[in-house]
Image: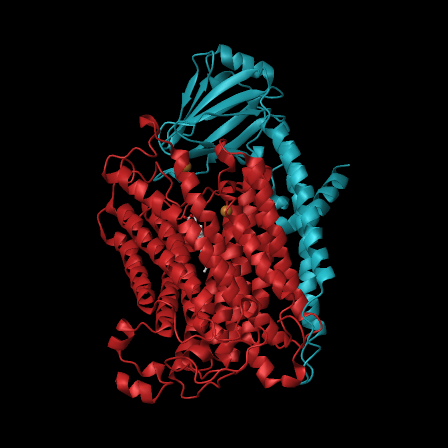
Chain colours: A red, B cyan
Amino acid sequence: MSRAITTAPSSLAHHGIIEWLTSTDHKHVGILYMCTGIFYFLVAGLLALVIRAQLSQPEMTLVGPHQYAQIFTLHGTAMIFLFVVPFALGLANFLIPLQIGAPDMAFPRLNAFTYWLFFFAGLTIFSGALVNGGAAATGWYAYAPLSEISVSTGGGQDLWIVGLLMSSISGILTAVNFITTIFLYRAPGMTMWRLPIFTWEMVATSLLILMAFPSLAAVLAMLFIDRHFGGKFFDATAGGNPVLYQHLFWFFGHPEVYIMILPFFGVISEIIPVFSRKPIFGYTGLVLSAFAIAGLSMGVWAHHMFTTGVVTNAFFAAVSFLIAVPTGVKFFNWVGTMWRGSIVFTTPMLFAIGFMLNFLIGGITGVMVASPPIDFQAKDSYFLVSHFHYVLGGGSLFAIFGAIYFWFPKVFGKMLSERLGMSCFWLLFIGFNTTFFVMQFLGVMGMPRRIYTYPALPGWGTLNLIASIGSLIMAVGVLVFVWDVVTASLSRKHAPDDPWGGYSLEWWTTSPPPEYNFTSLPPIRSERPVFDAKHPELVRSGNS
Amino acid sequence: MRSARTLLATSLLLCTAGCGVYALPAGATTQAQVLRQDWMVFTLAGLFVAVVVFGLILFPLFVWRRRSNDYPVQFSQNSKLELIYTIIPLLMVIALFAVTYRDEIIVEHLGAHPANTVDVLAFQWSWRFHYVGTAINIVGMPNAPPQLVLPVDETTRINLTSSDVNHEFWVPAFLFKRDAIAGVKNSFDLRPIRVGVYLGRCAEFCGFDHALMTFTVRVVSQADYARWLRAGGSSIVLSSEGATL
Ligand code: HEM
Ligand SMILES: [Cu+2]
Ligand SMILES: [Cu+2]
């Protein structure tokens, strides 16, 4: 089989199962990451539907308090650690070598190892559902002392800890691999200042992973020591300190939200120029803003701790506000890219526009909750649930769908349907905003997050019902997407190598790319070599 | 008069509906009055940014759709413009920070001589209110929420802590919450301005019965409060003014 591959280079899809399981090809690893991520998205999405069913009316009894806690813990943990981050890493795995004109990652076997570590991390976390006492039930940040053995006695919490430890090690190794590859494996002519924005964003993301994930690994190890080896790190009665847990966790946890968004700023920065038929506007500003965001995000962790009374709120509020500036720069650069362009409304472009509209609301509510006086009401309420879903769901998730519609032809050599894609977009966009906009009001009125039941206070039942209906609309959108993927995969029609008029090197090679990616490369004189090669009459001077 | 008020209220409601202030409780302490201003400032600033940036995103979509196969002018930078749109947001967040900083100091200010002091202890899954200097101890249970009685127009100091996991003291009508953490004593002042009963609850997930870890705050006249203290915390002596808010 593998010999057949060398003679028929573009037949990635014809690999047998063994080849898939043992492959170290960055494209295989990337696909495995992304497909596993989507699988967990579907699982966590189903859990979200159970949450919304339980909350659709006051005093519902579909699930009890203990089940409910497991469900929101698994929903949040899976969405973050098993979907958004792995999908970003998978996409980067697939794209980075292609975008820089390299045959593979710097460390292909390490790369495969990180995937399998992540694979077993997911199984470990979910296997908690099978043990006595059930899965972890302390939320995605598992505050001690609630997560200490004296309170959370079950093995589910331990499996959660071990699973996340595995995923943090996997992430660190992946980041090392990305940085080495980008710094050392670029094709001749591909200088750093000609890297596509997505690859730049992955440099910033990888640095953030290297700084933040060790703190997660440390706090998880400490919690494990507390639980099983008589540690007292977070036990106030023995001289420990529960606040320490929060510091260590959020020192990881805030950068984590940028790890979940920077790659998708990159995705949006790839899609918008192609469908505005112009170069990206303000390339340098976009790169610098990525590093400004990454740097500032290391200094804002205690904005999750404004109500603890033991941190300097003013400092953390100030730095948090500052992040709005480089984020704003990105928005204006995207607008500048569309300005006087020639805009084509394809499905990826629709998702990119949806991303901008949703993320803007997430950003505005983000500046609000970065103000301690507002956070005093908004924290731990549905206002916050709304805010971070606008960032992660309206933002990252929409960018993920945009990325899938944009790169599916390159990855699998098949086109997704534009008609189904657009229906999927509108269902998700309408459903998403129906679900999460009303949550702002619920939060301000006083509905806390993580409650499995609520009394019939004025307006609560109606607003919650609206949110639940919205989640059903989203579910239909996801089904349309699944249907689209299934029919496209079964179709015999082949996608062209460059269906969109793409700019970066992945559009130069075949769809799907052959085993070592390229048989030839165009000259690289700007950040969009494929465009330059196909439209020599339009080549700009400067900015290279 | 009443209808003019309603009209004013509805128009305010409509213009701020966009960002959540519309449902913001009226604010039943002097501190909450200040906090409400922050919500107003940030909501209006947010609405302004939303209108401008939504406009900037949507405008090109209507004006510059593809009309022919020709490529448009391939421009890609404008340093002056980029500098401008870096500086304007910077000035905006500096202004927002100034408002935040001023108001947080007011809200978190601890008066030198609070009229009353209550030690609040959070535990799985209810609250204990101990009135310092008296023998009054009010202890609740998940299905029997305790009641915190506060005098109107007088400052009460709350000293908050937890005896087990993290909890969080939240009274939505006061627009305020604070963590209860073992080993940490958190103090804040409340000065209620309206007689009535307000719902309060734990806002930090604390396990099984977190959803039922509620309490009520009953704000009473100063005369009632004095009577209540003399009666050793028996609520029979309270006159029944004020509705649940
Ligand atoms: C697809 C539609 C989705 C729906 C209907 C949904 C719904 C919800 C709801 C209602 C909660 C609050 C549960 C509670 O506090 O009691 C929640 C929590 C959460 N969701 Fe989602 N969600 C969705 C998608 C996502 C996505 C895409 C992400 C991230 C990428 C995400 C991440 C989270 C996280 C981190 C939490 C917090 C869990 C915790 O409190 O520990 N959700 N979700
Ligand atoms: Cu944060
Ligand atoms: Cu609680």
Residue B195 image offset from top left, x and y in percent: 60, 25
Residue at 50% x, 10% y: name it.
B230
Which quadrant of the figure has residue A369? top right
The N terminus of chain A lies in which quarter of the figure?
A: bottom left
Vertical placement of residue B214 versus A83, above or below:
above
The C terminus of chain A lies in which quarter of the figure?
A: bottom right
Vertical placement of residue A307 versus A472, above or below:
above
Which quadrant of the figure has residue A154? top left
Q: Can residue A393 be seen here?
A: no
Q: Out of A58 and A75, give the one closest to the viewer.
A: A75
Q: Out of B80 and A91, give the one closest to the viewer.
A: B80
Q: Is residue A377 left or right of residue A183?
A: right
Q: Is residue B3 left or right of residue A410?
A: right
Residue at 42% x, 71% y: name it.
A94
Residue B56 image offset from top left, x and y in percent: 69, 63
Q: Can residue B73 be seen here?
A: yes
